[in-house]
Image: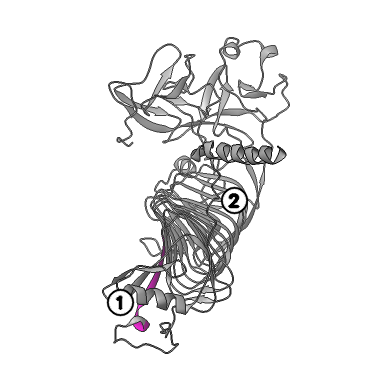
Amino acid sequence: MKKIEKVMAVVIACLLALLVPFGEMEVNAATTQKYTITNADFSAAYNNYKNGSREKVKGISVDSITDNTTIIWSLESGEYTLGENVLGENWYTASSGSLVSLDANGPNDMYHSIKFSYDSATLNLNGKTLNSDVFVENDSFTLSGNGTVKGDVDICNGATATISGGTYEGDVKSDYSAKLTIKDGTFKKDVTCYNGATLNINGGTIEGQVFSGNDCELSISSGTIKDDVDAYESKSIKVSGGNLTGKNYGLGVFKCGSLAVSGGTFTGGFTGLLVADSALKLSGGKFICDGSGGGPQSVDAIDYPQSGIMIESNNSDSDKVFADALVSGYEYSPSIKCNIWNDNGNMDSLNSFDGDASYTHYTDQATISVVKKNTPDNGSQTPSKEDSSNKSDPKNYSNEWVDGKWYDKDGKQTYKYKGGWKVNSIGWWYEDENGWFPQNQWQKIDGEWYFFHDTGYMAENEYAGNWTAYSEGYWWVGSDGAWDGSEPGVWRLSKNGKWWFKDSTGWFAKSKWYRIGGKWYYFDDDGWWDESKKE
């Protein structure tokens, strides 16, 4: 009887197993392929291509051959380690190990480019030499090891790449919305980014130039750069560390959205830091003119004086110069002397950034250290109807300016510097005697709420603020910059995947352009944001 029970138990167990849905069966995740690659692997992949096959050899295949002069290799996702110097002279060997000579345009004379266009890959140079370009698109990619890459490295089309070691003898580029982070390595030529790409330099030594182009984001936190760093029409530049030493300047920024410098050493032949028509937020750093450069020539062939920081502007008026590089809120040692290029091509020097200094020529070398000043502590604020209702009783003042005096959260006047409004050709801002001004925040002044952008200028005729999914939204400020007391506007995403902008009263934006959070948006007649229309 017991034997029959055991048999029945086995049968029942088998039947239950058959009843388990296939969808609930466990499937082991695919493991990352790991390859040690050599010339023989490239040779075998080339032979496959020559014989009409695209079969991969350790993840390697020939993608194409261009004009019989360039082989574009394709490497699938995986972890690759160089087992020897590859793709150099006489790389192509048959299975017997003997050199195969095809013709004058055979493999030995061809140029090589390795293309990574799969989900993710890593390449460990392993102390060896890769005689090839590296091309990465739409992927996640890492280059490491202490070897050498002879060709160019091109990261593009939204790819995300990290370089954490090695020597690179060609140009390195981040392009078309790609993101490249350099942690370590030696770079013999230029490192650049273009077309909305991101370049983060967190270490390493770059012997060529660094360039950031249109709509790009450049961040430098560490490392050594031995030639000029240039940025032209970039979205943002942030420097918090590193040693930037150029022939002309450590860093030159031209027509960029924003420049934030909080650390680092900037050394150049005629100026450490050159800022042209860009908003500058300065909170640290050391700026040195080493005197090795004569500076550019004016139209009259007059040598420009040298200084640690140079502000370049097409305006000769000091207030307009101040607007082009809004620098304030800091103590400088020694006093900053900034060279100004005026409309006549002559060189003047501005002794301070308050817009009131007289022009004097300045030719000495300068080393400038920056220490942040004491500022009023007003915390994080947003407009409030309750706070706006009482404009006269000092007992109710809290975190606000009244008649040029600062009242802290307890209504006490612990901050001695007086504040006041200033204006130039660009707009209005509020600044105190200590050089502090509000940035990227709401500020209550004489009973009214105002929002000030990153550059320090007052917002006007827009929905202003720093909205997140958990905040109340953006508030409307009129031509005088003051919040008008209306309800805040918020973004909403509809079920059809379209965005619209509304407030709690039932109003919504439509049939016109609106500036919201510092950017322009066009809404069609139905109230949907039209993403095809750009500001």
Q: Is the magenta stretch mostly helix, strand or loop?
A: strand
Q: Distance between the residues labelled 1 and 2?
A: 56 Å
Which quadrant, please, contains the C terminus? top left
Whole-percent x, y for residue 143 in the image:
53, 64
Q: Mark 2 points at which residue?
A: 336
Whole-percent x, y for residue 349 in the image:
51, 52
Q: Name the residue under label 1.
A: 69
- Residue in the picture at 33% in, 22% down: 527
Q: Which label sits in the foreground, 1 or 2?
A: 1
- Residue in the picture at 35% in, 81% down: 107
Mark 1: which amino acid?
Answer: Thr
Q: What range is drawn magenta here?
A: 108-116
Q: SS class of the residue under badge 2? A: loop
Whole-percent x, y for residue 480 in the image:
44, 21
Pointer 1 or 2: first along the chain = 1
Whole-percent x, y for residue 30 in the image:
52, 54
Q: Bin the neighbour count of mark 1 within 10 Å (Cα to Cα): few under 14, some 14-19, many 20 and up.
A: some
- Position of 249 with respect to 111 (left or right) is right
Q: Bin the neighbour count of mark 2 within 10 Å (Cα to Cα): few under 14, some 14-19, many 20 and up.
A: many
